[in-house]
Image (cartoon, rainbow, N blue to C red):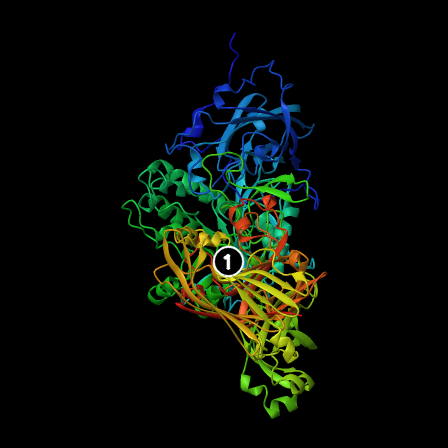
Amino acid sequence: MLKSDLKLPPYYEDPSVLHTGCEENRSYYIPFAPGEIQNSSRIQLLNGDWDFRFFDNPFVVEDFTKEDYSYKDYDSIPVPSCIQMHGYDRHQYTNINFPFPYDPPFVPLDNPACVYHRTFEIGQGKEKLQHYLNFEGVDSCFYVYINKTLAGYSQVSHSTSEFDITSYLKAGVNDITVVVLKWCDGSYLEDQDKFRMTGIFRDVYLISRPVNHIRDFFIKPQLTKNYTKAEIQVNFEFSGEEVPVTCSLKDTEGKLIAEQKAEGSKIVINVPEPRLWSAETPYLYTLTISTADEVIYQKVGIRTIEIIKDVIHINGVKVKFKGVNRHDSDPVTGYTISKEQALKDLRLMKEANINAIRTSHYPNAPWFTQLCSEYGFYVVGESDLEAHGATCFYGGGWETYGDLVQREMFAKAILDRNQRNVIRDKNNASVVIWSMGNEAGYSKAFEDTGRWIKEYDPTRLLHYEGSVSQTGGHINDMSMLDIVSNMYASIPSIKEYLASNPKPYMLCEFVHAMGNGPGDIEDYFDCIYGEERFVGGFVWEWCDHAIYRGITTDGRKVFHYGGDSGEYPHDGNFCVDGMVSPDRIPHPALAEYKNVIRPVRAALVSKEEFGGREAVNENWLSVELTNKLDFTNLKDYLKIEAELLIDGEVVETCDLGTLDLAPHEKTVVKVPFSTEYLQHKSSESGVSVKLRYLQQSERLLTATGHELGFDQLFLKERDIPFVAAGESDKIAEKTVDSVCIEENLTTIIITGETFKYCFDRLHGSFVSLVINNQSILERPLEFNIWRAPTDNDRNIRNTWQEARYDRAFPRVYETKVSKENGVTAIYCRLAITAIQIQHILDLEVTWFIGADGTITVQMNGKRNKELPFLPRFGLRLFLPKHYDKVNYLGYGPGESYVDKRRSTWHGRFTQKVSDMYVDTIKPQENSSHYGCEDLTLYSSLGTPIHVTGKVPFSFQASNYTQEELTVKAHNYELEKVDETVLCLDYKMSGIGSNSCGPALSEKYQLNEEDISFMVTLQFQ
């Protein structure tokens, strides 16, 4: 006998049916009973363990509406949660590609269906109230049954759905069953770059309200009289009959500002001396809205956002957005995020000087914008809409970008998704810009939606990046958009736009923070600060997305990304692209961004003022400081400490205290310092001053003394004490004469009193270095042009590999050995080449060996300009693993590259090799150090190795080879070598952000034709 299956109405494939049984949209609030403040008796939270059953498709869902149906064989699952995080279905990460056939509005018949069940009680005395069931987020669509009767259906995963279930309830115990489908027609508009998860992933609760009540309200603060006077207008909508409303406004200290009754559905409250809200000063009033039977509390920030002379202003002040894109995500809980988890994000952002968030690419949890208002962040509130999969069907591309949104069947959904976003979050001061979605192309439906938004809420600005693409023959009307926004535009293209277009400009995504990167943040902010109409940008993105899979036997965390669950399609590790790890450990990218967007910048007034007799005698240095804050005087925000560095060592500090400097203003300060070090060392030493900016007092999320950033000002460059082999030999002439050379067709052996070196004529380098009876090389010394590709090398990587850079080797044409004045010289003419490839580099290399064993190598080369720029060029040495500590003068202590070094400073650092490794979930090039002037490697067992260059060089010391980092897919798979790998680089190409952004700027490419590199190794 066949079992009876439930027959669901086919709403999930009908774009004309988006919601049934749902209430009209309203702003997010929780009503209280009169007299209640902290906890509301009007809300019954239905979170907790629910009965749960997973079905392969909706056609086999058992008919739970039968009276004798039992849930006893069901599993249990927590609500809220994502089912994939509890072992159901499978994990899948895809960016652009839809995870189902392109067949709108239809979805696969094998459409996983999840049945949730629980009971709840309606107590005595509440039967006369109206009862509303709220779901704050369900992916992707769901059917609600109350006491076995279908009460409603809704979609739009990241928005609240509210059902009036009063007529379905009874006093006492009630039954609720929810059927959640993985896919619906709305999934075509939810093609966001993220793991695809399913379930009731946000809070569920019942609200009990009087029959006649305030249904919705809209708070509209307005500023007048040059932003010195304010009025707060509140408009009300009612459910049932209109009820009398009284409003009171209090400041943060609880002082009553005003109290008055509404006239019908409107009230206007005057605020004579308003405290204005901004991200720097997030001042919030408390508005209490009272009726006879209910109280609603709403935090109100008074602020304006407007465009004045084509420049975006907040409260009449020009602002810059120093933002990030943020998903609701966690490696353990998935889409389900608590306030505590969100606050951890916000605290890290505040510590990093970030002032703006784009809710990519959907409304975040409904209380998130309230947190942003409370703690001070500008928010670009984005609707739950992305459809870039329309570019990926066969024959598709950017010309089909708008295929979905230009179909009439989706017009209703486009408007609905934006209305749900705008109406829900409209009363939050933090939301300053509405975003109609992301990467879905453009259409009349967007134009109509934009007009609705501007009419409904003219107090905010509107943007939509997809409007810049002309697709499908549609002629775009952008008149309702206030801002032109792009993503990943190159700086030249931005300047080109600004030169010929009037609207303000914003990068809704830029400096793609994937893996080791980004490397071009400073360049973008040079442009942002230099162009008034360029309001700023939002880094893609805040956090790596990955699934936590436990810990290896040796204690390493296991994170999985696309493809690790055997899914198809997937986009690999493209989701691992944040400035913090999945468990919120900051990457170097966050430190880099933090210092680029520091609240104050310093510059030398005149280098000539330093070093002259008058300047030294007066014991001060002139520095120009610029306040990069928009609303805050520096005296109320930070104090400054100065450090005097001689050859990278701090020799003196002074406390400059606070500085009275208004926002956007500049001033010159005198930095005092002692002259004794300068008088003693200034002839050869490098001199710099480092200014540290420390938070003056405790703020909402950050502590007193927290470092907000720094500047390093170079007063004098160091004369690098470079000594070539033979120049510093202080040994007896008989020792010089004791150096002996033996050679044959393949090998040259140089033997001195304390060393024996073996040189390979066939490869042009040393295979053995023994000094003081200790072997220095574990493997032959190598010429090195390869680096483990970074995520930002993902495009150039193929070109590099086509040029065989990863398989290059030397071909020696000539080797000569000579000896003069006790210095042995080995000259080699060679090429760096590869199989089936022309010469990559033609080199003339001379190795000089002093009588004390010092080695100097001079490399002069010509790069083949027919081939792409090089990842790097230098030498690689495999040293015994007991060389496990370094001391260097260069940019540190974090990793540094030619275009990624603003979080580091030029100083003297001592570090363990094991501590220098920078971990990324997908292994890649890391931990190089730029601008190194000297380097010493120390061993607990042997002779130190001291390295100097004729000019600054880059170096890297690691326990991993570039080959290992190239081939391994996950960090927990890496295997250390039994050596210390030392790379000495003439140059390393920059990092950039080409994983999604523009190609690496030419000025950061190792692209020169003529190369000259000279470095000395001394064994002390």
Q: Where's residue 724, x and y in %?
A: 56, 75
Residue at the image point whose x is 35% and y is 67% from the top: 499
Q: Is residue 49 left or right of residue 532?
A: right
Instruction: From the viewer's perspective, tell me whether residue 761 is left or right of residue 1008.
Output: right
Tag 1 secondary structure: loop
Residue 387 appearing in the image? yes
Image-quadrant location for residue 338:
top right
Residue nearer the viewer, 452 or 912: 912
Residue bearing mark 1: 518
> Disc 1 marks which amino acid?
Pro
Vertical placement of 807 versus 332: above or below? below
Residue 754 percent across, percent down from the top left: 66, 68
Q: Residue furthest top?
A: 1
Residue at 55% of width from left, 55% of height from top?
430
The answer to whether residue 659 is seen in the rendering is no
Q: Quadrant of residue 841?
A: bottom left
Rate crowding at label 1 as few (under 14), some (14 to 19) or many (20 or more) other CA atoms within 10 Å: many
Q: Nearer the viewer, residue 305 or 777?
A: 777
